[in-house]
Image: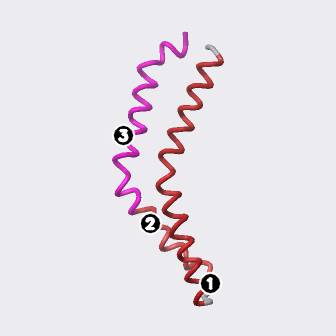
Amino acid sequence: MDHGIIIDLAQRAITVALMISAPMLGLSLLVGLMVSIIQATTQIQEPTLSFIPKIITIFLTLLIFGPWMGNIITEFTINLYENIYRYIR
């Protein structure tokens, strides 16, 4: 197996992982920032207060972006299995 193929495969796997995790991480970051601003404004310093909005945000993000995420990972897996002979040669 050539080193170039391994690097290309690893690069595509990292790209897919970043694409799949970006919506959840981005939206939970925004919700966490909004909750932190509200906590700083009202001086409520309860550390567990930010978990519930983040969990709800991640759940809704999975409901909304779930089919897209599944499509991305399915395409990557199908492409990997279709080209496996080229990778191991």
Q: State the residue lying farthest toward the top.
A: 89
Residue 38, image x and y in percent?
A: 55, 82
Residue 48, image x and y in percent?
A: 58, 78
Q: Earlier in the sequence, mark 2 or mark 3?
A: 2
Residue 54, image x and y in percent?
A: 50, 68
Asked where in the image residue 2 lies, by quadrant, the reply is top right
Which secondary structure type mostly characterizes the magenta part of the structure?
helix
Asked where in the image residue 1 lies, by quadrant, the reply is top right
Residue 78, image x and y in percent?
A: 39, 27
Q: Which residue is mark 1?
A: 40
Q: Which residue is mark 3?
A: 71
Is the residue marked by circle 1 packed among few (<14), some (14-19), or many (20+) residues within 10 Å? few
Is the residue marked by circle 2 packed among few (<14), some (14-19), or many (20+) residues within 10 Å? many
Is the residue marked by circle 3 packed among few (<14), some (14-19), or many (20+) residues within 10 Å? few
Q: Amino acid under label 3?
A: Asn
Q: Which residue is mark 2?
A: 57
Q: Amino acid under label 2?
A: Thr
Q: Residue at x 42, y 25 (%)?
A: 79
